Image: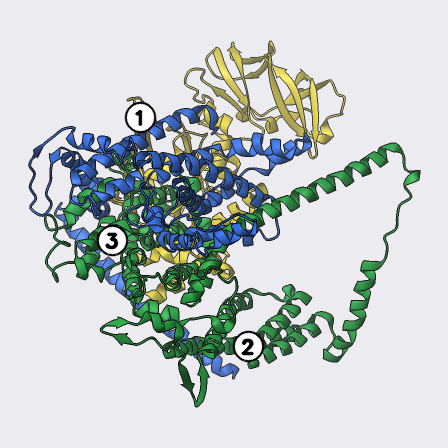
Amino acid sequence: MADFIKNVKGFFNKIGSAIKKFFWDIRRRINNVKRRIGNFLDKHNLNFASKFPGWAKALIYLSPALIVLAIFTFYPIINSFALVVYQNYNMTNDTITGYTIFGNFLTVITDDSFIVPASHTGSSAVINTLIIVFISVPISVLLALFIAAALNSIKPLKNFFQTIYFLPYVTNTIAIGLVFAYMFKAEGGLVNQFLSLFGMNTENLSWVESGAVFWRSMFVLIFYSIWSSLAFKIMVFLTSIQGIDKQYYQAAAIDATPRNRIFSKITVPLISPMIFYILVTSVIGAFKIYNAIVALFGVSGQPAGVDYNLQSIVMYIYKFIDGSNAGNLSVAAAGSLILFAIILVLTLVQMQVSKKRVHY
Amino acid sequence: MELRLENLTKIFTNKTGIETTAVDKLDITIESRTLVGLLGPSGCGKSTTLFMIAGLVKPTGGKIFFGEDDVTKLAPEKRGIGLVFQNYALYPHMTVYQNILFPLENMDVPRDEAVQRVKDMANLVGIGNLLDRKPSQLSGGQQQRVAIARALVKKPKVLLLDEPLSNLDARLRLQMREEIKRIQREIGITTIFVTHDQEEAMSISDKMVVLDFGKEQQYDAPQVMYNNPDNLFVAKFLGNPPINTFEAEIKKGYLTINDKKFMKFDIPDGLYDIGMRPENFRVAEEGGFEVDIHNIFHIGRDTMIHFDFNGKNVRALVDSDDIVHDQKKVKLTIKSERIYIFDKETGQVINHG
Amino acid sequence: MDKNLFLKSNKIEKITLVFDFLALAFYIFAFFALFNMLALPEVVDGHMQLDTLQFMLPIYNLLNVTFDKYAMNTMITLDMLFMLVATPMLVTNIKKLKNRTIYEIDSYTASAKFIQGIINLFSLNIVSGVLRIINMFVLVKFVKGYNAKEFFKSIFPAIKAKFKQWTTKKEKIDESKLDEYSISIKKSIRRQTAVSAIRISFTYIFLIVMALIIIIPFYWMVLTSLKDFSGSTSTNPAFFLNISQMNWVNYKVVLTEMNFGLYIKNTVIVAIFSTLGTVITTILAAYAFARIEFKGREVLFSILIMTMMIPGELYIITNFITVSKNGFGWVGMPTGENSYFVAMIIPFITSISYIFFLRQNFKQIPESLYKAARVDGCSDFKYLMRVMVPIASPTIFTITILNIFSSWNAYIWPRIITGVGGLEGQQYWLISNALRDTAFVLDNGRVMYNLQIAASALVTVPLLIVFFMFRKYIMNGIGRSGTKG
């Protein structure tokens, strides 16, 4: 029996080395050919590759990425500036009726669902987005910080909790959004069931369906947004907290520092670059919220039969491409540029503020 | 393979246009099958020279010859050299076996022969039983052996080592430098290595090149250079404890120390730098030059005494039996060929060949 | 330590693993067979009669044994459980077998074997169960030196001894004899312990509450996906389901009638090709920026970094024009002339943030390795493939995972692309589009939540499985990618 196994193993080894020998010989042959070509070129002084090594090589390596980037990243940036000055760009015929410098921007800004809400809708894309950003980002960052600190302080079950907290990251936004919408169902939804345990009257308490009040549906949206964004933040914070040199804590312990001071005066400042980075990226990400709204409320961005709209800036823009206002790409371009400007300003402001508080 | 450097020069220009000469007209012939050390303080240009020989740095002027071939413009991979880096540069994700096999993959060698060469080389350097380990699982000395094996498996014409022993601890250094010498002898390959440790260089080199600010100071066998330094720099660089140097006048043909006549020299009168090695002093049984001892250190087999020559502190290493521990004066002698007289301006030695 | 016993135990373990593997294969096969047998409602006018789904009472016949819908549900559920338990057990056992040394065997290993043996017996894997229990006795002999009979004899006294240990009172130190200082130290130690005990329990309570909030949607999702229509729409939904009430047929409906098999396939195709393309272009470009010296390298790189700040929405507008008939003509053409996959994959085949991330990693590889390879005659490309890529493989793996996740979550771009294609475009929906735009309604307009949530579960679970397989690498990679930013 042992002999048989030995024979089988020997057989596989022989195959293995035959394969390796095969590749070796191929490589050797290719190398020889390359060498001969190289010598030939050298002799006749034709070896251009050695004369411009840097540029030529770099070009070959960069070309796949650069070509794709040029067509689908650089060109669109320039083209957006062009689109923005077109008037009534018709995609099917590729025609325009004229040029306008600020016309499209004005259309966006004066649109009553963008910045200044009309009296009957009571909300606008910009206001919605601002609400989402300024409520969900601080809450999720703080929550993630506390959870990361808590995780860092326990030993048993740490991996177990880490795995659980990471689950929302690996999910599909729309799929779980549907589940959330189902959980917040007025009739028989899990949330209403839970609330009725506390004696609340949940009859006809609508969260995402018809009859939902603005703040209730906004609550669901914010809740979902925080829920799905926690995982990444917790992971990053945990990694950075774990990277803090233990000696700082030991020094503080010798000085009898109470735990909350350790947290606020040592842990937080030492990971402040990371907190800053997460804040900036979270703000930018929250400004671009879209999938979550579609998941909960559909492409229209509102629960059935209400007169307000929960659309975000991005949703507003997309409606000009694909939704209710389809075909008006110039206005969409104008909206995108406005969005870019807002994000840029906010980022710069954050960077200014960080100069005082972030310690590198 | 004889290696010849002809007026090799390297000048670095930084962004603001300031030029630094790293290597200045180095002209040396290294005989075949010898182990030569490039020695000098930090920044003297020894690593730059090594990399120019390797082809990784292009010289600003001069030529490099491998045997009869001018390889100055040749790419590194075509020169047939083996290079061992200071931090060994082993591929961390490959096993020792794969690391040593790697250079052969680019050469025209059949696989069976390549595998055999790897095994032979591994056995030669003493790591034949570690072929399946990854570099992170090896000690410093073992990693270095792998690096040497990888450099030699190509059967190069020249072996270059960049500060091979500086990353090892003291005890390992002793062992590894003997290993390097043994391997070099066994294969018989022309080898150049760079170091700032003069003891290391002196112990294993056949010949040494001492460099200072890119200029060659002397090129000789170690013991020759030790006993017959060409200039003050070489004299001061070699030797531990270092050579004693002080100013002295030659008055009327006599070397004058502490206002007394010390020894007769056939040299024109004037002010000179004098060098005397501590170990060359002997306690005189009769006659001799008397000095006031102001410090005695007993160090096991030797005793170090401190005294003044012309106001400068001088050390002498003498036999412990010749000195009593609270002795205040002693009479010393030193052979005349062990006194080095250097010209004050050029630093060149005057009274030696 | 008797080495022979150790080797014997390993041999038994190897045979047990073979049977484990066979059992797992059987579970998988049985699952497919049973799933295939599940009965779907009949199709009338090309339209499945979903309202009858709940009330169907099919009778299944396998090897001359008949069983009804409930038995079928129970069998599939049990099969799922077995698979869920057997797979990680098999994987960890294989890993342990390779790595275990003779010094690591202790009584815990023996008891672990026992527990696994019991699990095997419950999973109907009789052979493995018996083998494992035999193995346990071998290990017991190895560790403690006695064989089966003596082992049983020793259980009872051992329990008695442990019990006694717990109940003996600890000696009380006479406190009156201590001086004030010691007493105060003791008090403060006691207080400290109490405080830290409270702190730890609050921490755990906090973590548990948060964990519950995170995990309840998942539980609710799986639960609802297995309910029937009235169960999912009732005003008082159930929190648990009986094993026989788990309607696995929901998944079959979603896969076939609602075409989710097609949509998942589309998403997988897009994910694979997009990731392949991204990895290739990113490796090449990062190498160029990290190792190749060329004029303008830093300038070009800074330009790229600046474009990272620009929101993706801006690109989508123009890219839409570019890929439609005024540009490349991949979409928006008459039916049959469209290349939807090309339009979905190519525009996003390169990501500047990945290039940045990988370039950082490449730069950390010491340059002396490159010089050593140059001296050995290694070309740039070979160095990239044989040295840099293997060393940077954790980062490349992270990039792959991130890219797969973003393909899985893509919504707006596929929607725009397939939206212009009408019915033809619908065939190219990705899962996010399908989830949102498929109408899970009955003829009377009521929403079939159980099917909708089953579709969500179908879409979520594969990624969860991938996650659990590569959990360590994924979490480490994401954490590191964030800190490098």
Quarter of the image that includes the C terminus of chain B? top left
Q: Nearer the viewer, residue A22 or A248?
A: A248
Percent of width and height locating residue B88 = 44, 46
* Chain letter, yellow: B
What type is the residue that disc 2 sits on? Thr
* Chain letter, green: C
Output the chain of dot 2: C
Which residue is located at x 51 percent, y 48 percent? A201
* Chain letter, blue: A
Q: Nearer the viewer, mark 1 or mark 2?
A: 2
**CB under 8 Å between callouts 3 and 2?**
no
User: Which residue is labeled 1 in the image?
Assistant: B14
| Residue under disc 3 on the same chain as residue under disc 2 | yes
Percent of width and height locating residue B125 = 48, 55
Which residue is located at x 36 percent, y 63 percent? C448
> Is residue C2 at all visible to an observer of this figure?
no
Query: Does dot 3 land on a helix, a strand or a loop?
Result: helix
User: Which residue is labeled 2 in the image?
Assistant: C16
Dot 3 or dot 2: first in sequence order is: 2
What type is the residue that disc 1 sits on? Asn
Q: Quadrant of residue B20?
A: top left
Percent of width and height locating residue B76 = 29, 45
What type is the residue that disc 3 sits on? Pro
Q: Nearer the viewer, mark 3 or mark 2?
A: 3
Q: Nearer the viewer, residue C471 or C416?
A: C416
Image position of C55 with respect to A90: above or below: below
User: Which residue is labeled 3 in the image?
Assistant: C414
